[in-house]
Amino acid sequence: MRIAELSRQSGVPVPTIKYYLRENLLPPGELTSPTQARYGERHVQRLRLIRALVDIARLPIATIREVLCEIDQPDPVLHYVLGRVMKSTLTPRGQVDPDRLTAAEQKVDEMIARRGWQVSAEAPARQAVAEVLATLAELGVGDLGDALDEYAEAAERIAEADLATVSTRENPEELVYAAVVGTIIGDRLHSGLRRLAHENASATRFALGAPPPPDC
Amino acid sequence: MRIAELSRQSGVPVPTIKYYLRENLLPPGELTSPTQARYGERHVQRLRLIRALVDIARLPIATIREVLCEIDQPDPVLHYVLGRVMKSTLTPRGQVDPDRLTAAEQKVDEMIARRGWQVSAEAPARQAVAEVLATLAELGVGDLGDALDEYAEAAERIAEADLATVSTRENPEELVYAAVVGTIIGDRLHSGLRRLAHENASATRFALGAPPPPDC
């Protein structure tokens, strides 16, 4: 198909497609003349993935390039691919009080030890979790009590379900694709489900007598 | 304290503080002369909250203004405040195939019915979850099998733990503050914990014989 048809099928405007081609996010089409190229189904699929990473995961273009490059590796080893993808998609905030961060890192290490999790000392997610805990403490809502362990147990169940889902794919390339997409796009699924569960828990737990006050 | 000291204590540069003052994110200080104002501890706290909403939740300034306004309401009713905050922080993507979206909405409705959740038909999170499911289907990784119910059950446990944590606060203003901050900033906590749990599950489940392939 021509670029106009590619644009129609993917919902991505032609100038944006040309930008992705220049940025090497999208592989070039097959040249049919010096100024025209033909595109196929894999271009449609790739554009949909790029749009999802832009719109839902809000990843910057440079990070998307790294993620796509990882997905395109031949003979991928899931564990290491995921490790590298996480490193590029979980950037530290780096604005937290060092003492609070040290205290939070210790809490995370203790939680990991209690659960017996096998995670590397340099896992970017370890730092990300510690930063969030330190930030919550800074904002005066850091006393989670036993909730951190509840959260970790819930994360464990989610991760088991995630792996069970992707493991149905036998081809390593497809497995890695499903795992990377599911991990990155899945964040928004879980935050949506958590909000629905909040609404339900709040409707169940709190009396709802008063009418809603005026909007902000 | 003067604005320079406020900048030092909060870690926010003076020009950024002035921008937040102009945008009405930060209440004005107490004027001590026509060109000088004095700031207090609540300004330090407010700046930390704004920075967390910018850096961690990546919310746009207009949305942060709405969230802060909700937090500042007197006599807040948690259920309705959270509902409105969710509406402003969960913006729909709006780029999904309508047929796929309809199919996904039905899946979400069925899941909500199976769990007996009390959630309003217009909950923005319902739409957000359906959009993610439709996007995953579009990307060819939409067959979650029983995982959606597993995910929902995990979300329920997280929401229960969230509410148990915030409910220890007796003052309604503090309760609403903790719930709003915990919901928005908590998303990053859960995505970090999920990645740690992934690493553990992947280390446990998959053989890790091959050395890591070269980086992208």
Image (cartoon, coloured by chain):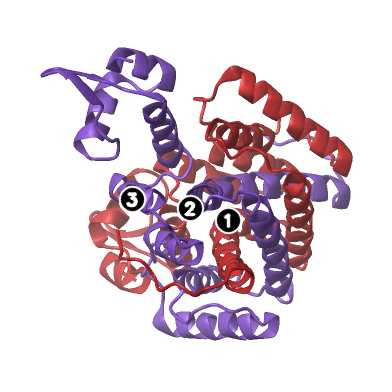
Chain colours: A red, B purple
User: The N terminus of chain A appears in which quarter of the rendering?
Assistant: bottom left
Chain letter of mark 3 equals: B
Instruction: Measuring from the top left, give residue A5's x and y in whole percent.
Output: 30, 72
Callout 1 amino acid = Asp
Q: Are marks 1 and 3 in contact (CB under 8 Å)?
A: no
In this rendering, the answer to whether A31 lies above or below A144 is below
Instruction: Measuring from the top left, give residue B35's x and y in whole percent.
Output: 13, 17
Question: Residue at image x 36%, y 29%?
Answer: B43
Chain letter of mark 2 equals: A
* Mark 3 crowd level (few <14, some 14–19, many ≥20, 10 Å Cα): some
Residue at the spot of label 1 = A187
How many angstroms separate mark 2 from mark 3 (CA)? 27 Å
Q: Quadrant of residue A2?
A: bottom left
How many angstroms separate mark 1 from mark 3 (CA)? 27 Å
Determine the secondary structure under disc 3: helix
B76 horizontally vs B30: left or right: right
Determine the secondary structure under disc 1: helix
Give the mark toward the camera: 1 or 3: 3
Question: Residue at image x 63%, y 37%?
Answer: A142
Determine the secondary structure under disc 2: loop
Numbered circle sitting on residue A57: 2
Residue A73 at least partly seen = no
Q: Are marks 2 and 1 in contact (CB under 8 Å)?
A: yes
Numbered circle sitting on residue B69: 3
